[in-house]
Amino acid sequence: MKDTMTKSYFEVMRAGINTTFQDLGRKNLYHIGIPFSGAMDNRNFILANAIAENKENIPVIEFAYQGPLLRFKGEKVNFNITGNVSFNLIKKEEQIEGNCYQNYTLEDGDQLDILSTNKSVYGYLAISGNFDVQFQWNSCSINTKANIGANDGKKIEKDQLIRILDSHSCNSIRKLEYINSKIENIRVIKGTNFNYFSDESKKTFFEKNFTVTKLTDRMGMRLEGPKIENIVDTNIKSEGIIKGVIQVPADGNPIIMLSDHGTIGGYPKIGVIISADYDKLVQITPGSKIKFKLVELLEAETLFKLYNMETQNILNKLK
Amino acid sequence: MIKNISNLGDAALYCDFGSKVNKEINSKVIQCFKNIKEKNIEGITNITPSYNKLIISFDLKFTNFINLKKKIENLELKEFVNTKNDIIKIPICCDKKFALDINRLEKILKISEDKILETFFSKEYYCYMTGFIAGHPFLGDTDESLRAKRLETPRVKIPKGSVGLTEQFCNIYTFESPGGWNIIGNTPINVFDKTNEIKPNLINPGDTVIFNQISKDEHERHYD
């Protein structure tokens, strides 16, 4: 234990689903087989730290569908939750129904019950301060596949303690008016194997709906819909992939690579999700329909600039 | 000079070195990888060498496709002549307990188990690339008599340490993982060490791997 550590901690009374520590992830390790990882929804991660008055890349707790139930012990600490999340702050005398994008104060004995993400997948819990977590390759991000990152690379579990290393107080209420807007279409650039697919399937890919299946996690999103017909070869020589790549294996059902993806893949790539739409893509729940829209590279670059400006505008409102 | 660069999405470069897979082309890919890595070009977030491709991903906040493409195209490539590649010995146990697909291979290849193993152990293998899962090496080339396709239905779980064959390649599963390669044995050696941040991979691209056969007892003793 470090000297600077506070005596404050969370006791995990319910772990929630896929509850992990995440930050911006780790770079320059694809060549040894380690993906970026990091918070799935980058904007909501950044907002959580901004509301907490933390630096940009401070570890937060990410959860999917259902969040954890935590009992807080120790000195006061502020927290906020981002995403589209229902949660209650249970105090000795009262129960407060929480709002996202607003800071609250936890006192000794309080419980934080993160009930669910609404019509979305991921939510984030940030405290004003630091969790006591290990870093590997400069990131705490948990990759449960290779057991890399904080918590020995494993999901947060019931009954464990989450220690708080240090915290800083901010007395003012920090609050954002922000709504996670829905997206009509997910925009896509043609992939490097676009011509492996039949003309009919190339059209279908951008005209028909696909359903997000339950076989979706931090590694990838499996889709079902009209079968995409390959007319060249259903395998390619294995090569590097990046997040957002849409591979189509022999069964004709597209798979989108997400933040914990395998770094090398051998299926043809029909397209790649544009960077500006990634945060919205990962929030689409299983059972929902998605439709792809084809854009050119220059348009994708402009859309990313807009996305980035929008994030900055939201952050400026906090100042 | 790196030619044939296209975009993979809006945040990656796709450098194509042709469709052939051999040591010569792969060495070029690795040379380019080392050159680009050494230059520390702003905005690059990852460089992934594979058999005959090099994927360079970047942060759109700092650069874009056209700018980075120019930089990469005009890069002067120097030879890394002094880079020493390691020779790594990997013990494998081919007991029935581990050799999940040896009978399948006997049928497909129409040669006996003994002959398969004798042929497999008689060669040295070159590491083309690492990845898919952390530390996982893609090795080659296996003898032509040992070349079989992947399983039609991949396994959901392949045990950690499994050694598999497909086409002209062999591999080592560094973690329990799904996969479709033909499993012929298992190594008790840790091929990926997450506690070693400088050199987590035992086997790196360009290295040579020599497999040697061990008994079930020796395999067990290795796990302490």
Image: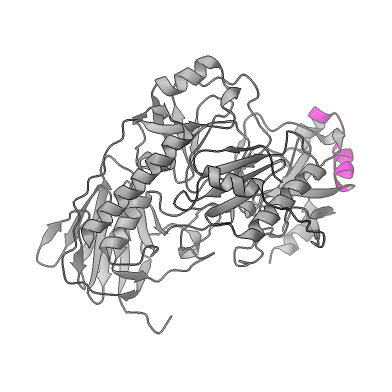
- Quadrant of the rendered structure where residue B141 is? top right
Q: Quadrant of residue B152?
A: top right
Identity of the residue drawn at 30% across and 54% down: A312
| Relative to B134, residue A139 above or below | below
The residue depicted at 54 percent of the width and 54 percent of the height is B45
Region of the chain picked out in magenta, as a range: B108-121
Left or right: A198, with B183 as reference point = left
Residue B97 at x, y percent in the picture: 72, 46
- Measuring from the top left, give residue A58's x and y in whole percent: 38, 65
Residue B192 colored in magenta in the image: no
Q: How many marks?
A: 0
Tell me if residue B111 is in the magenta stretch: yes
Residue A79: x, y in percent?
25, 64
Is residue B156 toward the left or the right of residue A118 in the image? right
Asked if residue A152 lies left or right of residue A180, the reply is right
Q: Main secondary structure of the magenta part?
A: helix
A68 in relation to A116, above or below: below
> Can residue A16 be seen?
no
**Residue A5 on image: x %, y %:** 37, 80
In depth, the one of A191 and B206 nearer the eye is A191
